[in-house]
Image (spheres, rainbow, N blue to C red):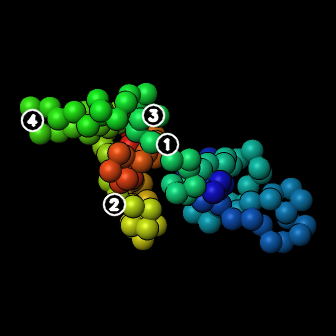
Amino acid sequence: MLKRYCNNCDNEVIEETDKNLKKEYPYVCKNCEENMYEFETYLKEDDVTMKKIKTTQEYFNIGIDELLFNNSDGYTKEELKLFDDGLEVVFFDNEKELEEEKEQFKKYTQSKKYEIKATLQTINKRIAIVLI
Ligand SMILES: [Zn+2]
């Protein structure tokens, strides 16, 4: 889901409820305690589950056999590719687990100032979120 954020502090803004104020300042940033013009805000995709989930095969454009190839250090090619793709990769067993841990995950990414680069489905049907 797209959400709107404050240009100054990157916190989420809310819609102004006062009809007259709203004509000029449609949003309010509670953190800055300021009424905001629309151009003082920006939209960003917030909900990780709403992003289109690609398979690792599509994303890396590599076949399943090659992705499952085990390196001498015990990692599959798929895992190595994922680790190489971002600063960190977080795995979830399935969409249900992602949904349950979404808030916690969001807090974690915000605390580390990570951005989500890609949400992928691995060959064994786990969900891998690549963070940058
Ligand atoms: Zn603000």
Mark 1 touching mark 3, by CB under 8 A? yes
Asked if residue 8 lies left or right of residue 96, the reply is: right
Q: Is mark 4 within 8 Å of ligand 1?
A: no
27 vs 83, nearest the viewer: 83
Where residue 4 sits, quadrant-wise, is bottom right
Task: For label 1, count other residues whose C-alpha is less than 10 Å away and answer few (under 14), some (14-19) or many (20+).
Answer: some
Asked if residue 69 lies left or right of residue 105, the reply is: left
- The residue singled out by tag 3 in the image is 59
Please name the amino acid that badge 3 sits on: Tyr
Please name the amino acid that badge 2 sits on: Asp
First in sequence: mark 1 or mark 3? 1
Cα distance in 3D space between marks 1 and 2: 16 Å
- Name which residue lies at 37% across and 30% down: 63
First in sequence: mark 1 or mark 4? 1
Where residue 16 sits, quadrant-wise, is bottom right
First in sequence: mark 4 or mark 3? 3
* Residue 65 visible here: yes
Q: Is residue 77 above or below residue 118?
A: above
Cα distance in 3D space between marks 2 and 4: 23 Å
- The residue singled out by tag 4 in the image is 73
- Mark 3: secondary structure: helix
